[in-house]
Image (cartoon, rainbow, N blue to C red):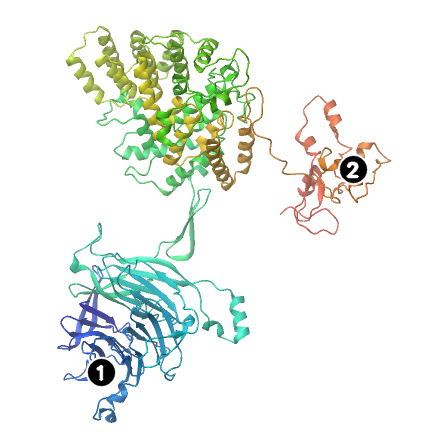
Amino acid sequence: MESAIRWSPSSTTTEQRFLSVDVTGKAFRLCKVTGYNASDKTLRHEVLSTLVDVPSFRAFDWSTSNENLIAVGQSSGEATILRLDASVKESLSFPVRNQRYCNAVAFSTHGLVASGLDRVRNDFCLNIWDVNQRLSPAGGSKGFPEPLRKLASSEPITSIKFFRDQPDTLVTGVKGQFVRIYDLREGPGNPSLQFQTRCVHNLAIDWLDENYIASCQPTNESTVCVWDRRVGARLVSPSVGSSASSPDSNQSIAALQFKSVFDSKSSIWSLRFSKTTRGYLGALSSTGHFKAFEIAKDYQSEEYRASIDETFGQGSFKNYPEPVYARHIRDVCLPFDHPTRGCEEKDRVVTFDFLNLNMSPQPSAIALDGHGQPRIVTARPPCAPVSLSSRGGLAFGIASGDSDIRTIHPLSELISPISGLVENIRARVLSSSKYPSPDADKKSAESGGLNTDPISSREMRERAMSLGTLGVLLTAKEALTLSTLAQSRCREGYLFNEARNRSIVKDDPALQDLWTWIQRKSEGYEFLDSISANNSSGARSDSSGTTMVVNGLDMNYIGVSNVWTNDMGLFSLAYTLKQFRLTVIIGHDFEQRRISTKADDPKSVAEAIAHLVEQLNLPETKGCETAYPEHRRLCLHICGATSSYKELVETVKTLSSENQHTKAAALAVFQDEAKLAYLALRSNEPAQAHKLLAMAIAGAAKGDNNSDWEETCAEISKELTDPYARAILALVSKGDWHAVIQETTLPLKYRVEVALRWLPDDELTDYLEDATSEAIREGDIEGVVLTGLGHLAMGLFRSYIEKFNDVQTPVLAMSHTVPRIISHPPFVTQFNAWRETYRQQMNSWKMQLDRARFDVESRRFAVTVDGRKLIPPPPQQVSLTCNYCTRPLTQHDASSQVSPSATVETVHPTMGNPLGSATMSGTVCPRCGRHMPRCGVCTMWLGTPDPMSKGMTAADAEADPRKATEDEVMKRFVVFCINCNHGHHAHHARDWFARHKVCPVAECNCICDR
């Protein structure tokens, strides 16, 4: 260290002074602050006194009781006292018999000075001198002066500090061994306290709580320790000439320890406590890195404090150690070599000391840079506390006061539906960013929008899902809205009703296509344009999809890759599965799909596919020559492609009427129906761009393509963002179907459709293999059309969850096939983990009813086509029990079948009410025969219907053909108060508590309606 600075602890608001030390120039300057520049936080000052030509020194200390005194430790081992106010240079030296380095000096508040020396054999290394004695006339006598006390025989001292509350007590650092506390009031050989550690440098004592001491190991991982002097181990001082020490108990550990405080290439230069804030420790490295550690005490209850004071006397609690922790660790100044916020080496902080004045809410320090310019540095206040609830609410504190808390809630709490909110947020963000929005694809043909760098449909969706990372910041409400997207969808009924799900995810076309595909598979490939509005629960009565059952083989939820490779689990797709560590037991899925073992069952998947194509009555379509026509037709059907020309014409007309001219034309082009595509672009008030595209199709139909034609079409294609227009131009410019397949802006299912129609068998195999692998690797939700909802989909959804953190959609989708089709233990275990995570999320959202609805509906899929249940029903969770024998009151409970001889209880048969029918006796325990409690309102037995109401019994309800009303149903239920345990008929309790809050039972003061 080349310089140092010390702030005067006696400074006031009217006069502030500090001591500037030039170690290299061997000078001391006492300065007075004259002004402060708020812009650069530098201090203006004047020099009050200067002390120059000081002998070379290795350590110094400034007296806090007499600011005119400075002690320096010289290389010869002498400790010298210098005066700042003397007209001529005066000094007072304390020599040593054996010359060695003086590593540390320290003043006490009542005239003592301690010097710490390097090790010399058979000599003391810690000398205590009385300055007042030497300054007296008798102290100047001739002869070699002896120290007041000599300690630490043959133990090198590295650092010294006196305690201010106990001036006769000091703490020292014994090189590489201990932090040791000496009490000078005790005689030689009496015990002292010590901590075994290598952190023995730069000792610092907390100004406001001197029980805590800080020390450090400057190099080798730069460790800082904080010690509590109330827990040090007792030490018997060794005799002269011996370096051994014998603690009487186990060595104490540090109250706090901070490892690797600074970079390994730097060392700790300074360690000091704040003079205004208890437990605020500052540390400075050689690179100018200034850190602040805010140390706080753990909470101790008043009962605990009072018990100690009561046992050991009033005030004894202060003598017991208190656990501490690091509340905050902050950077005050960064190192000069910081990669982004560094500075010139000369501008770094080289020394500091805390002020004794409160200039800001945070402790301030005076610092000296490499140019010798003093300035004030203050740590930024800690961030206000922030907490995010599981339901999406954000609570945060205000810096102006600890008691001020504000909350921010998602926009979805006040505005619905969530899809509209997401679309509005996305439109705002993408309109301000350099990236195109997903809606640009639909509008580019009309607007002529430019796009110099088109991206794939998958990347377009990923950007739409990554709002806030595109250079445009989100507001807090927008961020919370997007973070609670799954919660909002669940609240709107995102479950197993595919039609409703499509409306909920209108902001995500890929998810809409997913639920469209699942609906077609669930309904036996008979696509419905709408679902009855009466189906409010979203559960279908029959999800087995019997249309896809071929002679006892369940082929529901298969994908294009499964069909083309004849893989229903009978063969493993090594080219895909090896990349994603997925294992399929050969034949496992096939056996799971097999329903029966009839003689006419297909013996191979290829035969099953042929049977299925015939059963679905799939017609032949245009395409290339192939050895597997049935496979291609079934794959096209899985993609959702139109299977006949008539269906194609209807689809094109519908899309054109909806102003989707380019999409209608593209679907016609994909089936090599150029004329139909031309008509689609010319119908329903086409735009100028549509007419130009129709002209391009007409020109390509003449077959006069040349290099100029291709170049022109390519230039036009570069300016378009509409994927369908780009696909059409790619085909008409080159006349090659490969150009369409390579147009990645086109949704995956249409690229797969073109490949299925026009690629030769070998090329198609390679393309599907690569497309399936990429979809699984990238977690592309569009790839479900390739993987289906079988084993391959588990890998796809795993990547999807890792990328988007959305477990909701994979769980809802895969519930259709796990465990109905997928029952391999690793996959079932993984799915159960996803499922349980989603269930816990719904519970944390306080949506237990939705979670229960999910549990019930998802079990309906765990049924094979032939009706076998794959998941046993859950055990009964709620039941009424008898107050006497604690057995369930259900009449068919197994416990009621125990014979009387098997128990010591006596069964008392209960006769019916002699004034009424047998039904009026109410429900009785089938084991002990006792009644349920009486109703607190009508005092009749619970389980007894109200005789004054119509339909009081199940027989009456069955005799009445009309549907029972809610009131009539409630009359058959009983309710209990969970506080006083009194029971009531449900409709009686409703009527009573509509007017009262107190329990109707006499002498019961329970407020049941709380």
Relative horizontal placement of residue 694, taking residue 306 as reference (left or right): left
User: What amino acid is labelled 2 in the image?
Assistant: Ser
Residue 785 visible: yes
Mark 2 closeness class: few <14, some 14–19, many ≥20 residues within 10 Å: few
The kind of secondary structure element at disc 1 is loop
Left or right, 288 with respect to 538, comes to left
Q: Position of residue 559 (x, y in %)?
A: 41, 20
Q: Is residue 23 above or below residue 980?
A: below
Q: Secondary structure at mark 2?
A: loop
Question: Tag on residue 96?
Answer: 1
Q: Residue at x 29, y 37 (%)?
A: 470
Disc 1 marks a residue whose amino acid type is Val
Q: Which residue was labeled with disc 2? A: 899
Asked where in the image residue 704 lies, by quadrant, the reply is top left
- Image location (x, y in percent) of residue 846: 52, 41
Q: Earlier in the sequence, mark 2 or mark 1?
A: 1
Is any part of residue 689 visible from this angle?
Answer: no
Quarter holding the N terminus is bottom left
Gap in Å between the C-alphas at discs 2 and 1? 102 Å
- With 598 as the anchor, is 323 left or right in this view? left
User: Which of these two is toward me, 432 or 941?
Assistant: 941
